[in-house]
Amino acid sequence: MLDHAEPAVRITLNRRDRRNALSLELMDELAEVLTGEPISAATALDWGLVNRVVPAAELDAAVGELVLTKSVMATRSMAADAQEGISAFLEKRPPEWTSE
């Protein structure tokens, strides 16, 4: 007599099965987000909804860093070479840099 059971079905996954499994997982996550149910910061990070999570005590400092980074980027984007780079990209031509 057997004292344990063994599965009688062998499950195999091909590429389509893995893709479907991933789609189902994403649909479950999407359903949770769309219902308005709160999720943890760790879950939001895991799902890729946010790119950084910091403890509450460090939030003001993290926001300050982000604001500083954005302001530096905005200031630099107004430089002549930055504008030339953007224009050249949009016009699909090589840039003509004015400074080194």
Image (tube, rainbow, N blue to C red):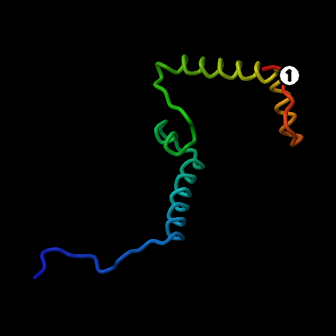
Quarter of the image where one finds residue 31: bottom right
**Image coordinates for residue 61, horizontal then vertical, percent:** 54, 17
At x 87%, y 30%, the residue is 96
| Relative horizontal placement of residue 41, taking residue 81 as reference (left or right) | left
**Image coordinates for residue 45, horizontal then vertical, percent:** 51, 39
Q: Residues within 10 Å of mark 1 (few under 14, many from 20)?
A: few
Q: Circle 1 sits on which residue?
A: 98
Q: Amino acid at mark 1?
A: Thr
- Residue at the far left in the pictured view: 1
**How many callouts does the rendering have?**
1
SS at mark 1 in the image: loop
At x 83%, y 38%, the residue is 89
Quarter of the image where one finds residue 66: top right
- The image shows residue 40, relative to residue 59, as above or below, that is below
Q: Quadrant of the C terminus?
A: top right
- The image shows residue 21, relative to residue 40, as above or below, that is below
| Relative horizontal placement of residue 27, taking residue 76 as reference (left or right) | left
At x 86%, y 43%, the residue is 92
Q: Quadrant of the N terminus?
A: bottom left
At x 72%, y 23%, the residue is 73
Q: Of 27 and 52, which appears nearest the observer?
A: 52
Q: Of 38 and 98, which appears nearest the observer?
A: 98
**Image coordinates for residue 63, horizontal then vertical, percent:** 59, 21
- Residue at the far front in the pictured view: 100
